[in-house]
Image: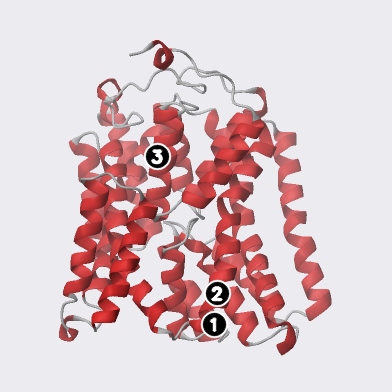
Amino acid sequence: MTDSASAVPARVSFVTAFYFWLKLGFISFGGPAGQIAIMHQELVERRRWISERRFLHALNYCMVLPGPEAQQLAIYIGWLLHRYWGGIAAGVLFVLPSLFILIALSWLYIAYGEQPLVAGLFYGIKPAVTAIVLQAAQRIGSRALKNNWLWAIAAAAFVAIFALEVPFPLIVLGAALAGFIGGRLAPQHFAVGGGHAGHQRNYGPALIDDDTPTPAHARFRLSRLFMLLLVGGLLWLLPMALLCALFGWQGTLTQMAWFFTKAALLTFGGAYAVLPYVYQGAVGHYGWLTPTQMIDGLALGETTPGPLIMVVAFVGFVGAYVQPVFGPESAFVGGALAAALVTWFTFLPSFLFILAGGPLVESTHNELKFTAPLTGITAAVVGVIVNLALFFAWHVLWPQGWSGGFEWPAALIALLAALALLWFKRGVIEVLAGAALLGLLVQALR
């Protein structure tokens, strides 16, 4: 190890961290697994702002929460580094670029969605996203599945969700129970990282290392918890009360705020766990958009940075644009406001979960009785990610079902994307751009 790699990194300024979180907001492609992999590579391996064990302990907590775990992990690390403003900056910058991008793309979709150019781009990007999810599953699994016990939990989770269609919250509970029992029977296998920390690559000392004391602002205080809950409640109540006063309880924007508040509390397991609920409400109950628009919005969410649940911004924009809340002449303003509102109500709980619960989690990072269940959950989530990869592959390669035939061009694009990611180690943005060009070529040949 070189001298620079063996030295503890210098203290990170808030400005330096701010620019990193902003950059992350623009490059966080590949869904939660890909985003977590990017953060691990940057924060654990390259910059050494946080150690592997502390990173995985925070990740385990975020995995059991409703909401986007990658954004919550960013909030957690930002909070550890620079108190509450650090967590707020990390969480906001994680989603802000994707909000602006999705508002622009949503408007372009409404205006030009039927054009062959757009159809060709979508055709190429979807197989590449499948390869990105597979690569992310491989990277997360290689870190989390360190022994046969954890492999067994991951396999059981995959069978449960793929073959038995067990709800994700039950899989989480089962994995936590398996981790708790395993931590009692074979504790060496259920330490953070699977019990083989000594065999993991040594990245050098970290700014927040395994034995770094919990900073003063991250220690639990009951008065601080009550204050955070009060502030969070007001941040939800005041805009909701304003919407009720301006538009009434049945107003479109008010109903969007209430609906996505409920959705935010049901997103155990990431965006795909809550998408059926969003589809049922936004399409079936409220009629804010059509089934085709919902599917296209999901494709846009897959190909933009930020959490996949940011598809809610597309739902809000289209719902308020097609049924103008401020009149036809201000359709864009209404759509953009709706996208911002649903983003606010969807992500507000994530900040409260981390800033309020983080001190309790920090107090347990060296206690196996708390970490073993969370290690079991992490292993189970690997199995769930593999299931999601197969879900992508099925809808990309057989878009019309078995009877509709196999999409050979899409399969070739997926294979090339996988080779570029896994063999040639190309970046996500490069792969997406290349796949989009191939999609345009297929569209032109047809």
- In the displayed structure, 262 sits above or below 290; it is above
- The structure residue drawn at horizontal position 35% and vertical position 38%, both measured from the top left corner, is 375
- Specify the amino acid type for callout 2: Ser
- How far is mark 3 from mark 1, CA to CA? 43 Å
Residue 147: x %, y % from top left: 21, 34
Q: Secondary structure at mark 3?
A: helix
Task: Classify residue 370 by image quadrant.
Answer: top left
Eye-nearest disc, 2 or 3: 2
Mark 1 neighbour class, 10 Å CA radius: few under 14, some 14 to 19, many 20 or more: some
- In the displayed structure, 102 sits above or below 65; it is below
- Specify the amino acid type for callout 3: Leu
The answer to which of marks 2 and 3 sits earlier in the sequence is 2
Q: Which mark is residue 374?
A: 3
- The structure residue drawn at horizontal position 57% and vertical position 83%, both measured from the top left corner, is 288
Q: Secondary structure at mark 1?
A: helix
Q: Is residue 438 left or right of residue 28?
A: left
The answer to which of marks 3 and 1 sits earlier in the sequence is 1
Q: Nearer the viewer, residue 298 or 168?
A: 298
Residue 259: x %, y % from top left: 61, 72
- The structure residue drawn at horizontal position 74% and vertical position 87%, both measured from the top left corner, is 329
Q: Which mark is residue 304?
A: none
Disc 1 marks which residue? 110
Eye-nearest disc, 3 or 1: 1
- The structure residue drawn at horizontal position 42% and vertical position 44%, both measured from the top left corner, is 36
- In the displayed structure, 150 sits above or below 98; it is above
Task: Classify residue 265 by image quadrant.
Answer: bottom right
- How far is mark 2 from mark 1, CA to CA? 6 Å
Q: Are marks 2 and 1 in contact (CB under 8 Å)?
A: yes
Disc 2 marks which residue? 106
Residue 201: x %, y % from top left: 29, 24
